[in-house]
Image (spheres, rainbow, N blue to C red):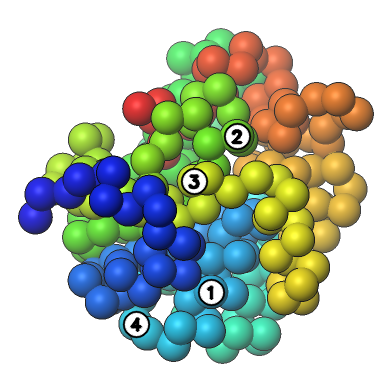
Amino acid sequence: MTISSANFETQSAEELIQWTMDQYGLNAGLACSFGMEDMILIDIISKLKSPITIFTLDTGRLHEETYEIMERVRAHYGLEIKTYFPNHEQVEKLVREKGFFSFKESIENRKECCAIRKIEPLNRALSELEAWVTGLRRDQAVTRTETAKVSEDMDHPPLVKINPLADWTQEQVENYIEANKVPINALHKKNYPSIGCAPCTRPVEPGEDIRAGRWWWENPEHKECGLHRPS
Protein backbone atom coordinates (compact mmCIF):
# COMPACT_ATOMS: atom_id res chain seq x y z
CA MET A 1 0.00 0.00 0.00
CA THR A 2 1.34 3.43 -0.93
CA ILE A 3 1.19 5.90 1.96
CA SER A 4 0.74 9.64 1.46
CA SER A 5 1.57 11.24 4.81
CA ALA A 6 -0.22 14.47 3.91
CA ASN A 7 -3.56 12.63 3.86
CA PHE A 8 -3.31 11.94 7.60
CA GLU A 9 -2.04 15.26 8.96
CA THR A 10 -5.51 16.60 9.84
CA GLN A 11 -6.68 13.42 11.56
CA SER A 12 -6.96 13.24 15.33
CA ALA A 13 -5.10 10.68 17.42
CA GLU A 14 -8.31 8.71 17.91
CA GLU A 15 -9.02 8.70 14.17
CA LEU A 16 -5.51 7.53 13.35
CA ILE A 17 -5.61 4.72 15.88
CA GLN A 18 -9.03 3.61 14.65
CA TRP A 19 -7.73 3.66 11.06
CA THR A 20 -4.75 1.57 12.16
CA MET A 21 -7.00 -0.96 13.86
CA ASP A 22 -9.33 -1.18 10.86
CA GLN A 23 -6.46 -1.47 8.38
CA TYR A 24 -4.12 -3.84 10.25
CA GLY A 25 -5.79 -5.26 13.37
CA LEU A 26 -3.35 -7.37 15.41
CA ASN A 27 -0.77 -6.95 12.66
CA ALA A 28 -0.25 -3.44 14.02
CA GLY A 29 1.62 -2.98 17.27
CA LEU A 30 2.01 -0.14 19.75
CA ALA A 31 5.68 0.07 20.73
CA CYS A 32 5.27 0.99 24.36
CA SER A 33 7.87 2.24 26.85
CA PHE A 34 5.11 3.44 29.21
CA GLY A 35 5.94 7.13 29.06
CA MET A 36 3.14 9.68 29.19
CA GLU A 37 2.52 9.58 25.44
CA ASP A 38 2.34 5.79 25.38
CA MET A 39 -0.08 5.82 28.30
CA ILE A 40 -2.36 8.20 26.35
CA LEU A 41 -2.29 5.84 23.37
CA ILE A 42 -3.10 2.90 25.64
CA ASP A 43 -6.02 4.85 27.10
CA ILE A 44 -7.35 5.61 23.60
CA ILE A 45 -6.87 1.99 22.50
CA SER A 46 -8.78 0.71 25.52
CA LYS A 47 -11.72 2.98 24.73
CA LEU A 48 -11.89 2.02 21.05
CA LYS A 49 -12.05 -1.67 21.97
CA SER A 50 -10.64 -2.88 18.66
CA PRO A 51 -7.77 -5.35 18.18
CA ILE A 52 -4.17 -4.14 18.21
CA THR A 53 -0.95 -5.61 19.59
CA ILE A 54 0.81 -3.84 22.46
CA PHE A 55 4.47 -4.69 22.97
CA THR A 56 7.40 -3.49 25.04
CA LEU A 57 11.16 -4.00 25.17
CA ASP A 58 12.58 -5.03 28.53
CA THR A 59 16.26 -4.08 28.31
CA GLY A 60 17.05 -5.57 31.71
CA ARG A 61 18.01 -2.12 33.06
CA LEU A 62 14.67 -0.40 33.50
CA HIS A 63 13.59 1.54 36.58
CA GLU A 64 11.49 -0.25 39.17
CA GLU A 65 8.82 2.40 38.60
CA THR A 66 8.60 1.37 34.93
CA TYR A 67 7.83 -2.22 35.88
CA GLU A 68 5.24 -0.91 38.33
CA ILE A 69 3.41 1.07 35.64
CA MET A 70 3.46 -2.00 33.38
CA GLU A 71 1.55 -3.89 36.05
CA ARG A 72 -0.84 -0.98 36.56
CA VAL A 73 -1.66 -1.12 32.84
CA ARG A 74 -2.52 -4.81 33.13
CA ALA A 75 -4.72 -4.17 36.18
CA HIS A 76 -6.31 -0.86 35.10
CA TYR A 77 -6.96 -1.63 31.43
CA GLY A 78 -6.89 -5.43 31.34
CA LEU A 79 -4.63 -5.35 28.28
CA GLU A 80 -2.05 -7.92 27.31
CA ILE A 81 1.53 -6.63 27.03
CA LYS A 82 3.83 -8.66 24.79
CA THR A 83 7.38 -8.39 26.15
CA TYR A 84 10.59 -8.83 24.18
CA PHE A 85 13.99 -9.31 25.81
CA PRO A 86 17.52 -8.90 24.39
CA ASN A 87 19.52 -11.92 23.29
CA HIS A 88 21.15 -13.11 26.52
CA GLU A 89 24.34 -14.27 24.81
CA GLN A 90 24.92 -10.82 23.29
CA VAL A 91 24.29 -9.12 26.65
CA GLU A 92 26.64 -11.48 28.46
CA LYS A 93 29.39 -10.95 25.88
CA LEU A 94 29.05 -7.16 26.06
CA VAL A 95 29.19 -7.01 29.85
CA ARG A 96 32.03 -9.53 30.17
CA GLU A 97 34.17 -7.73 27.60
CA LYS A 98 33.36 -4.08 28.33
CA GLY A 99 31.80 -3.92 31.79
CA PHE A 100 28.50 -2.56 33.04
CA PHE A 101 28.94 1.08 31.99
CA SER A 102 30.69 0.93 28.63
CA PHE A 103 27.89 3.08 27.16
CA LYS A 104 29.29 6.15 28.93
CA GLU A 105 32.72 5.82 27.35
CA SER A 106 31.75 6.82 23.80
CA ILE A 107 28.79 7.34 21.48
CA GLU A 108 29.84 4.17 19.64
CA ASN A 109 29.73 2.14 22.85
CA ARG A 110 26.38 3.61 23.82
CA LYS A 111 24.91 2.79 20.43
CA GLU A 112 26.32 -0.74 20.74
CA CYS A 113 24.51 -1.20 24.05
CA CYS A 114 21.28 0.21 22.59
CA ALA A 115 21.64 -2.06 19.55
CA ILE A 116 21.86 -5.14 21.75
CA ARG A 117 19.29 -4.22 24.36
CA LYS A 118 16.77 -2.35 22.15
CA ILE A 119 17.28 -2.60 18.41
CA GLU A 120 17.64 -6.38 18.12
CA PRO A 121 14.50 -7.14 20.16
CA LEU A 122 12.63 -4.36 18.35
CA ASN A 123 13.50 -5.89 15.01
CA ARG A 124 12.17 -9.23 16.20
CA ALA A 125 8.95 -7.58 17.35
CA LEU A 126 8.50 -5.67 14.09
CA SER A 127 9.17 -8.78 12.00
CA GLU A 128 5.78 -10.04 13.18
CA LEU A 129 3.91 -6.86 12.22
CA GLU A 130 2.81 -4.80 9.22
CA ALA A 131 2.60 -1.47 11.03
CA TRP A 132 3.72 0.02 14.31
CA VAL A 133 2.43 2.88 16.44
CA THR A 134 4.64 5.14 18.57
CA GLY A 135 4.23 8.07 20.93
CA LEU A 136 6.71 10.30 19.10
CA ARG A 137 6.00 14.05 19.18
CA ARG A 138 7.67 16.73 17.09
CA ASP A 139 8.48 19.00 20.00
CA GLN A 140 10.22 16.30 22.05
CA ALA A 141 13.65 16.82 20.51
CA VAL A 142 15.57 18.38 17.62
CA THR A 143 15.79 14.90 16.10
CA ARG A 144 11.98 14.60 15.87
CA THR A 145 10.80 17.89 14.38
CA GLU A 146 9.99 16.32 10.99
CA THR A 147 8.03 13.36 12.35
CA ALA A 148 5.10 12.48 10.09
CA LYS A 149 1.83 11.15 11.46
CA VAL A 150 1.88 8.25 8.99
CA SER A 151 4.73 7.18 6.73
CA GLU A 152 6.43 4.22 5.20
CA ASP A 153 9.19 3.14 7.58
CA MET A 154 12.37 3.32 5.53
CA ASP A 155 14.35 1.58 8.28
CA HIS A 156 11.96 -1.38 8.43
CA PRO A 157 10.41 -1.84 4.98
CA PRO A 158 7.65 -2.55 4.16
CA LEU A 159 6.28 -1.50 7.57
CA VAL A 160 4.13 1.57 8.06
CA LYS A 161 4.91 3.82 11.04
CA ILE A 162 2.07 5.69 12.73
CA ASN A 163 2.65 8.57 15.17
CA PRO A 164 -0.83 9.73 16.29
CA LEU A 165 0.53 12.33 18.74
CA ALA A 166 3.11 13.85 16.38
CA ASP A 167 1.53 17.32 16.50
CA TRP A 168 0.64 17.31 20.21
CA THR A 169 2.26 19.74 22.63
CA GLN A 170 3.41 18.91 26.15
CA GLU A 171 0.45 20.88 27.46
CA GLN A 172 -1.97 18.73 25.45
CA VAL A 173 -0.33 15.59 26.83
CA GLU A 174 -0.65 16.77 30.42
CA ASN A 175 -4.23 17.98 29.93
CA TYR A 176 -5.34 14.64 28.47
CA ILE A 177 -3.75 12.71 31.32
CA GLU A 178 -5.45 14.89 33.92
CA ALA A 179 -8.85 14.94 32.22
CA ASN A 180 -8.93 11.18 31.66
CA LYS A 181 -7.21 10.15 34.92
CA VAL A 182 -4.56 8.19 33.02
CA PRO A 183 -2.08 6.39 35.30
CA ILE A 184 1.53 7.42 34.71
CA ASN A 185 5.02 6.37 35.71
CA ALA A 186 5.78 7.71 39.21
CA LEU A 187 9.10 9.10 37.91
CA HIS A 188 7.26 11.76 35.90
CA LYS A 189 6.42 13.51 39.16
CA LYS A 190 10.12 13.51 40.07
CA ASN A 191 11.14 15.58 37.02
CA TYR A 192 11.66 12.64 34.64
CA PRO A 193 9.68 13.71 31.52
CA SER A 194 11.48 11.14 29.34
CA ILE A 195 12.30 7.74 30.81
CA GLY A 196 14.59 5.07 29.41
CA CYS A 197 17.04 2.71 31.05
CA ALA A 198 17.88 3.60 34.65
CA PRO A 199 21.62 4.30 34.14
CA CYS A 200 20.89 6.48 31.10
CA THR A 201 18.12 8.68 32.54
CA ARG A 202 18.24 11.51 35.08
CA PRO A 203 15.75 14.18 36.20
CA VAL A 204 15.76 17.39 34.16
CA GLU A 205 16.60 20.77 35.64
CA PRO A 206 14.39 23.89 35.31
CA GLY A 207 14.70 25.30 31.79
CA GLU A 208 16.07 22.11 30.21
CA ASP A 209 14.25 20.40 27.34
CA ILE A 210 12.24 17.28 28.05
CA ARG A 211 14.90 14.88 26.74
CA ALA A 212 17.84 16.57 28.47
CA GLY A 213 17.87 13.77 31.02
CA ARG A 214 18.48 11.07 28.40
CA TRP A 215 22.19 10.34 27.78
CA TRP A 216 22.89 13.75 29.29
CA TRP A 217 26.62 13.42 28.61
CA GLU A 218 26.00 13.59 24.83
CA ASN A 219 25.06 16.43 22.48
CA PRO A 220 21.31 16.79 21.67
CA GLU A 221 21.68 15.76 18.02
CA HIS A 222 22.97 12.34 19.12
CA LYS A 223 20.18 11.55 21.56
CA GLU A 224 18.46 8.70 19.75
CA CYS A 225 19.04 5.05 20.54
CA GLY A 226 18.27 3.90 17.01
CA LEU A 227 14.65 2.93 17.59
CA HIS A 228 13.59 6.17 15.90
CA ARG A 229 16.01 7.71 13.45
CA PRO A 230 15.55 11.33 12.35
CA SER A 231 13.55 11.74 9.13
Q: Is residue 53 above or below residue 16?
A: below
Q: Position of residue 222 (x, y in %)?
A: 53, 17
Among the two numbered marks 3 and 2 on one chain, the one whose residue lies closer to the N terminus:
2
Q: Which residue is mark 1?
A: 44
Q: Are marks 2 and 4 in contact (CB under 8 Å)?
A: no
Between the residue at mark 3 and the residue at mark 4, the CA separation in whole angstroms equals 22 Å
Between the residue at mark 4 and the residue at mark 1, the CA separation in whole angstroms equals 12 Å
Between the residue at mark 1 and the residue at mark 2, the CA separation in whole angstroms equals 21 Å
From this viewpoint, which residue is outermost toward the front?
10
Q: Which residue is mark 2?
A: 139
Q: Residue at x 66, y 25 (%)?
A: 215
Q: Secondary structure at mark 2?
A: loop
Q: Position of residue 130 (x, y in %)?
A: 20, 60
Q: Position of residue 56 (x, y in %)?
A: 48, 60
Q: Secondary structure at mark 4?
A: loop
- Is 59 left or right of 101, judged from the image as shown? left
Among the two numbered marks 3 and 1 on one chain, the one whose residue lies closer to the N terminus:
1
Q: Which residue is mark 4?
A: 51
Q: Which residue is mark 3?
A: 166
Q: Secondary structure at mark 1?
A: helix
Q: Secondary structure at mark 3?
A: loop
